Amino acid sequence: MRILFLTHSFNSLAQRLYCELMALGHQVSIEFDISDSVTEEAVALFKPDLLLAPFLKRAIPESVWSRHLCLIVHPGVPGDRGPSALDWAIQRGFKEWGVTVLQAEAEMDAGPVWASASFPMVPTRKASLYRNRMTEAAVRAVLLAVERVESGQFTPERVPGAAHALMQQGDRRIDWAHESSAVVLAKLNAADGFPGVADELFGQPCHLFDAWPEATLKGQPGRLIGRRETAILRATADGAVWVGHVKRPGGIKLPATRAFPEAAELPELPLDGWWKAPVPTWQDIAYEEAAGVGFLSFEFYNGAMSTAQCRRLTEAFRWATTQPTTVIVLRGGSDFWSNGIHLNTIEAAESPADESWANINAIDDLAEAILRCESQLTVAAVGGNTGAGGCFLARAADHVWVRDGVMLNPHYKNMGNLFGSEFWTYLLPPRVGDEGARDIMRHRLPMTGPEAVRRGFYDICLPGPGFNVDVARRAAELAAAPDIAQQLAAKTARRAADEAVKPLAAYRAAELAEMRRNFYGFDPSYHVARYHFVSRSPHSWTPRHLARHRDLDWKIPE
């Protein structure tokens, strides 16, 4: 079928559904929901068999849904209607939630149901639920709905329900002096991603994001207790909760200590080294060992890696190489492995160009440390979505094992035609060929794990369920291999041979020469694109690589 996506943005859910439907042989084109007239024009150009709305913030115009079958992906169980569906489910502590694919009609979320799927809730952030459990349920429901549309034999049924209101900040308000840590975490988790919880820090208004539990530290309820790296700890009625990111009025989302310089006056609450803490606390970089394998996790918010984070992670990796292991697994975080440099901290810097330069050099230092590691085999266990420089940082490892269901975006050009670094010119062509490398870099579309393996970019795609257990088992087998010493020697020999042909320093210098032009040159495309990205500027048009119906050679189907 020809399926037109009508969506507010090409977010992770839209990307996953796009890849799934394309893999089934459907023709899929994308139009951002900009205005009714633009939507009507897109429908006239593409003449879709079906319109699918994976992520909308306003209603589809009657001029479209009254003439064409339009299916809405609603983040709620059948009968749930209205906005903030996932927010309410998290804050109310529901044990199970779901996704419903329903037909667009005049009343919001009240149309007949074509398919639905449920998932168990866990106490985590809204954005994490959305990207993982909800996305998996949405894929099941959408594929079933599309199958039913194709069959022509299914009649959708109406489900009685009640509408709920948009969750207001009054519903989210935290009473730090009287509410428990569990309640505070639920409120912060329900608002994570967007819109955050309106509150005050240091007597100034802001929105709070990125909450972490704290198991042992306590203080006077409501008071700020201390800081650790970029996070701030605040006492609750029965404990304390860490806040990792905040957004001040008129500003952008930033690490808490970066947004509030006053945090420097709080006492530092350091951890003892890189070892994973035995109890829940704020720890963005953590190391564990088992069966001769070192596991290095880095839980960076939204996968963005600032200059300081890259430097700390490089330090942690180098320390990990001194431990008595033969394999190091780079785990990344639960939602993202890495999305490369930190565009928000760059935007907030006094000189974004200088901070861009510092950040790309810091992430290159990390990539080079991984590439030059001779004492262990390295494995990138890509269990979360990964984009731009993060995709190539992972490829710096000897082995890349990716979870099925992860979305990969191994390209830079969407960010103002950035050239990119992280040694991609060294890592990519030998695996996919020169033409394959050019195709990946200009493709600018998401890639699934199976596709990355098929192209030769990554090595193994493992099933989503049990991914971490599977990784640990495979890594232990690798460490226990009788020829592990020979594997390490062969790795060192390959690196020496490559170095003799062309040093890593030469690849890095060439890439950074291009990046310097992106950061300091006459073309401001990168700076403009970065500003619009971090400011969440509304789209004014759909990029041509997404809207195939707007290609110059597109022909209206007969």
Image (cartoon, rainbow, N blue to C red):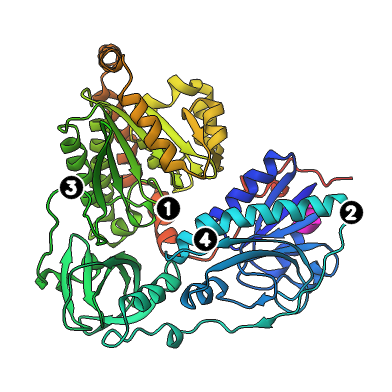
Give the residue drawn at x 40%, y 55%: 530
Task: Report the residue marked by disc 1.
Answer: 335
The label shown at residue 274 is 3
Q: What is the three-letter code of the residue carrying label 4? A: Tyr
Pick whichever, 291 or 342, lies toward us. 291
Q: Secondary structure at mark 4?
A: helix
Residues drawn in magenta: 42-46
Picture residue at 40% right of the left edge, 60% below the top = 531
Q: Which residue is mark 2?
A: 152
Tell us which disc is closer to us: 3 or 1: 3
Rendered view: 386 above or below 452 = below
- Pointer 4 residue: 130
Residue 173 magenta: no
Q: Which mark is residue 229?
A: none
Horizontal and vertical percent position of residue 171? 45, 85
Q: Secondary structure at mark 2?
A: loop
Q: CA distance from mark 2 to mark 4?
A: 30 Å
Magenta stretch, overall SS: helix
